[in-house]
Image: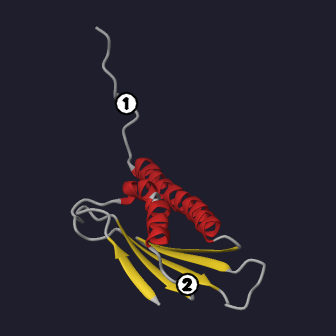
Amino acid sequence: MKTSFHFPSSFIIMKIIIRSKNIEPSKSIDTFIEEKIGGLKKFINILRKEGTIGKPLVEVFVEVEKETRHHQKGPFFRVEVQMHLPGKSIRCEATREDLRSAIVEVKDEMQQEIKRYKLRKIDLRRRQARSLKKSLHIAPDARFRKNKS
């Protein structure tokens, strides 16, 4: 079992940890995983908070495995991705005959889940702002625009 770490840049947003099981790890598979899963970083940038430089915003655990060694046909490559976002963990899994197609499928599922998570976060902020605005009591004679004179 091999574990490798990936730190994209000095401005760490996402930390990718790859684990392989029953498969001989190769540099090409590791770079393919880092390319596909690392592409999710653009969906996560908006969640970044001020003052968190140096700390990874998101940890991603990728497990790639060949289910059994005796399979002759059928789906036997399994990819599982767990992403720990602030306040939530997302887990997706795919089983395919081809390892690369399983990785792409998991990436697509993760992308949908991240978009759903972001939308919930944004909607929560909007609802809070709306309720705050309703709670403010402003005099009915108050005007917020300039009179044309």
Q: Is residue 79 above or below residue 49?
A: below
Q: Position of residue 113 (x, y in %)?
A: 57, 63
Q: Quadrant of residue 73?
A: bottom right
Residue 43 is marked as none
Q: Position of residue 85 (x, y in %)?
A: 43, 70
- Identified by mark 2, the residue type is Ile
Q: Secondary structure at mark 1?
A: loop
Q: Are marks 2 and 1 in contact (CB under 8 Å)?
A: no
Q: Position of residue 119 (x, y in %)?
A: 52, 55
- Is the image coloured rainbow, by chain, by secondary structure, or in one colour? secondary structure
- Identified by mark 1, the residue type is Asp
Q: Residue at 28% across / 8% down in the picture?
A: 149
Quote the CA–CA distance across marks 2 and 1: 73 Å
Callout 1: 10 Å neighbours few (<14), some, many (20+)?
few
Q: Is residue 69 above or below residue 82?
A: below
Q: Secondary structure at mark 2?
A: loop
Residue 23 is marked as 2
Q: Quadrant of residue 138?
A: top left
Near-viewer residue (119 or 24): 24
- Name, please, the residue furthest toward the top: 149
Residue of label 1: 141
Q: Quadrant of residue 101?
A: bottom right
- Would residue 11 appear left or right of 33 to someone viewing this image? left
Near-viewer residue (116 or 111): 111
Mark positioned earlier in the residue sequence (2 or 1): 2
Q: Residue at 55% across / 84% down in the picture?
A: 23
Near-viewer residue (50 or 97): 97
- Would residue 109 appear left or right of 47 to someone viewing this image? right
